[in-house]
Image (cartoon, helix red, strand yellow):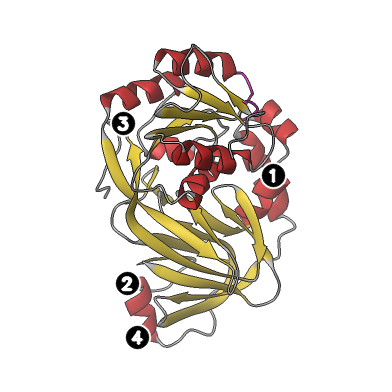
Amino acid sequence: MPIERQRQTDGGHPAFSDRVLVLNPVSGDSSHSTQVRDLAVDHGFSISETSESGDGVDLAADAARDGAEIVAACGGDGTINEVVRGLVEADALDDVTLAVVPAGTGNNFAGNLGIRSIEHAFEVIEEATQRRIDLGVASVPDGPTQPFVNSCIGGITAEASAATTPDSKDRLGILAYVVNTLQTLSEYDGMRLRVEAGGEDTWEGEAIFALVGNGRRFPVEGRTQADMEDGQFDVTIVEDKPTINLAGEAAIKRLFGGETANITQLQTPSLRLHVLDDTVQFSLDGEMVEANALDITTRPRSLGVFVGDEYDPDPD
């Protein structure tokens, strides 16, 4: 059943229109709501506003089940993640196109889609340039699954993200993450990690950071966009100290394509991250999951999205 107490419709558009915008009014610096509402009305959207964590999942699922063809997520990466989870829950990926309206602190995923601002997001929707991108799916072994569109991160930056309060985001914006990362780094002991890629080769060692990128990759010449349409994750491991207990030099070269170093990178359509000592925090598009193991697979080109002119379907 739709969540009527949270659904708000503006401008005379029907409550269950073919365009629905899920609005997080407190994301970023919380100054975007009026602008977004005005633009949404002008572009024929009904508006569903979240009031607490998790609402975006239910609102997006309701919109899809009620016939929406476009569901827009207005907020940060966490809001986008909730909306995508709702579309997955409603089994609507074949029928609904996701639109991203950036109103968070970092807006990394929106930037990777070539969307520069709130106003530009609505221009992109009207231009109607669509791509189908990969979707990541992570699960605790024998547990529930959770999709992600941008990245799954474990280690220092996930711990710092979990420690970043809404108040510090309001005061410092993106610098809040930097401050907390530097503070956490001085106290972080790292994690003993085993990576099993494709069920075959294994990397094991001490790491402070592991990034499984779907829309995002470790910066290459300042760019963070990964290839979102190749059915592969871009995986980066930042080692705390030289790699130990490797499964042979031949396995290293097959898995990583070269010599080991403090930064190790690979591409794979599936992997398991296994933390050997204890549970750690993993960030799935900013949504925190605590686990000692994650199984991660890709669903190639399963999510339709609107993209801007700066989106590169085949980044170097």
**In-image side of 272 versus 315 (left or right):** right
In the image, 279 versus 127, the foreground residue is: 127
Distance between mark 1 and mark 4 Cα atoms? 39 Å
**Residue 273 spot, x, y in % from top left:** 54, 71
Among the two numbered marks 1 and 2 on one chain, the one whose residue lies closer to the N terminus = 1
Of residues 189 and 117, the one nearer the viewer is 117
Identify the mark at residue 250; answer none if there is no mark.
Answer: 4
In this rendering, does residue 223 appear at all? yes
Q: Do the residues labelled 3 and 2 touch (CB within 8 Å)?
A: no
Of the residues shown, which amino acid type is indicated by label 3? Answer: Gly
Q: What stretch is highlighted in magenta?
A: 25-31
**Residue placed under numbered mark 1 in the picture:** 180
Amino acid tagged 2: Gly
Of helix, strand and loop, which one carries label 3? loop
- Whether 151 is drawn above or below 32: the answer is below
How many residues crowd around disc 1 within 10 Å: few (fewer than 14), some, or many (20 or more)? many
- The reply to whether callout 1 and callout 4 are in contact (CB within 8 Å) is no
Mark number displayed over residue 257: 2
State the separation of the CA atoms marked 3 and 2: 33 Å
Can you tell which of label 3 and label 4 is closer to the viewer? 3
As measured in the structure, the alpha-carbon distance from the residue carrying label 1 to the one carrying label 3 is 32 Å
* Image disc number at residue 98: none
Q: Residue at x 43, y 26 (%)?
A: 17
- Closer to the eye: label 1 or 3: 3
* Residue 13, placed above or below residue 52: above
Q: What residue type is labelled 4?
A: Ala
Marking on residue 308: 3
Label whose residue precedes the other's in the sequence (4 or 2): 4
- Asked whether residue 240 appears in the rendered view, the answer is no
Q: Which amino acid does label 1 sit on?
A: Asn
